[in-house]
């Protein structure tokens, strides 16, 4: 079986973009592949985060993975910092990463913004750590949202460069697995930006744990336009985003959806979308509450996951060290 690897940062509330761009796709293909899914806590400390919050977010994210349908029969679930090989490999691979390549990463530029003098160096090294996450497991496929495409390209380039330098197949070259529908869900308040956990405006995203009333309010306030025509049209990012979410959740064709809303107003679209979002999240939230009631079980699952993947990571790290002449 081909191996998949992916992860989410426990840096805030998990939202519909994370679900549609990542978790839902992991669940759907879990029986086809040999899967490793990670809670990337070392990535979450690249920007300031309250220790209590980080600690709680890790447990919550584990419960969300399971509540969304990841099954430990098919997936190994673990916390990145429980497998020390990630940090060690990251130092080594960082020494082989041209700074020019990192300078081109758009996420770093967006996140560091004006603060390039004061922001922690971790945000700069973020793509190297991500490359190690993937490469340590000899991953074939990386199911992610569109925003991670550039980091995946860098991962491939780094792996090829390292293999070439030492004339050995130390790393498997991974491929991105980016689905067409749901790969890029936009912010509800500024639909030219992607929906993100760290956006300071809570109305910009629908969290998987939002209650129906909150979901209704957020969708009601979502930015639209004054054209009053319900069509998929990238030139009209607000309506396009609401329709894209509707498309991803109902799994109906664009033609059918446009026909459904022919002659109808934005109020109708927002009401239907609210129903569909609430209906999707209700069973996830119910299962989430069940998992959160049993922290010992969550811990056991994460410990078993880390124990299962550690030898794979160690084997790759050892190969890296051997070819370089370390150890
Ligand atoms: N808006 C999105 N649409 C589709 N997929 C998305 N992903 C994230 N946002 C969207 C996918 O979710 C996975 C985890 O990514 P992440 O932990 O980086 O999540 P985030 O919400 O993007 O987190 P942050 O902290 O706000 O960081 P930024 O905004 O800088 O990325 C990935 O597979 C990602 O593609």
Image (cartoon, helix red, strand yellow):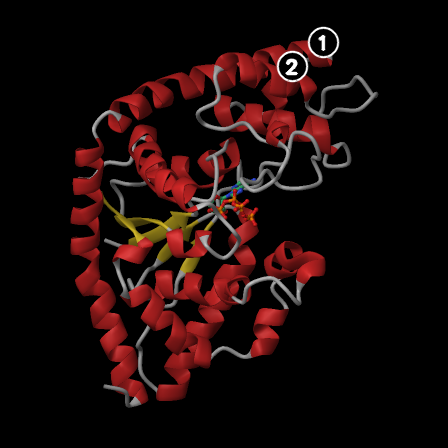
Q: Is mark 2 within 8 Å of ligand 1?
A: no
Q: Is mark 1 within 8 Å of ligand 1?
A: no
Task: Residue 115: give x, y in percent of width and height.
Answer: 68, 60
In the displayed structure image, the side of residue 187 where residue 76 appears, left or right: left
**Residue matched to label 1:** 264
N-term-proximal mark, 2 vs 1: 1
**Circle 2 — which element?**
helix
Residue at image coords 62%, 27%: 203
Image height check: is 188 above or below 91? above
**Residue matched to label 2:** 269
> For this rendering, which residue is in front, 111 or 280?
111
Task: Residue 315: give x, y in percent of width and height.
Answer: 20, 71
Residue at image coords 42%, 59%: 175
In the displayed structure image, the side of residue 139 where residue 273 appears, left or right: right
**Circle 1 — which element?**
loop
Asked if marks 2 and 1 touch (Cβ < 8 Å), the reply is yes
Q: Residue furthest right?
A: 226
Image height check: is 17 above or below 40? above
In the displayed structure image, the side of residue 59 where residue 105 appears, left or right: right
Quadrant of res 227: top right
Residue at image coords 79%, 17%: 228
Task: Residue 96: give x, y in percent of width and height.
Answer: 45, 81
Q: Residue furthest bottom?
A: 325
> For this rendering, which residue is in front, 5 or 263?
5
């Amino acid at each position: 079986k081909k191996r998949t690897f992916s992860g989410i940062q426990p840096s805030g509330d998990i939202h519909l973009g994370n679900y549609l761009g990542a978790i839902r796709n992991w669940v759907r293909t879990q029986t086809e592949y040999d899967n490793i899914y990670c809670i990337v806590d070392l990535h979450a400390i690249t920007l300031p985060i309250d220790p209590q919050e980080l600690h709680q977010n890790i447990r919550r994210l584990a419960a969300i993975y399971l509540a969304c349908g990841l099954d430990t029969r098919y997936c190994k679930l673990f916390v990145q910092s429980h497998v020390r090989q990630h940090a060690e490999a990251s130092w080594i691979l960082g020494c082989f990463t041209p700074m020019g390549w990192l300078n081109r990463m758009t996420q770093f530029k967006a996140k560091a913004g004006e603060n390039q003098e004061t922001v922690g160096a971790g945000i700069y090294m973020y793509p190297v750590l991500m490359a190690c996450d993937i490469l340590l497991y000899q991953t074939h496929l990386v199911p992610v949202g569109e925003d991670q495409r550039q980091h995946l390209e860098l991962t491939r380039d780094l792996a090829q460069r390292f293999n070439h330098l030492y004339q050995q197949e130390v790393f498997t070259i991974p491929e991105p697995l980016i689905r067409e529908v749901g790969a890029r869900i936009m912010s509800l308040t500024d639909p030219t930006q992607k929906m993100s956990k760290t956006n300071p405006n809570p109305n910009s995203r629908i969290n998987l744990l939002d209650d129906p009333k909150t979901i209704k309010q957020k969708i009601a306030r979502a930015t639209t336009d004054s054209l009053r025509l319900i069509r998929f049209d990238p030139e009209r990012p607000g309506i396009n985003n609401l329709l894209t979410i509707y498309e991803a959740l109902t799994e109906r064709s664009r033609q059918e959806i446009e026909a459904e809303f022919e002659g109808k107003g934005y109020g109708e679209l927002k009401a239907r979308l609210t129903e569909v979002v609430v209906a999707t999240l209700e069973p996830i939230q119910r299962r989430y509450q069940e998992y959160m009631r049993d922290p010992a079980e969550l811990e056991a699952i994460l410990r078993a996951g880390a124990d299962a993947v550690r030898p794979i990571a160690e084997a790759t790290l050892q190969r890296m060290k051997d070819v370089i002449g370390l150890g």
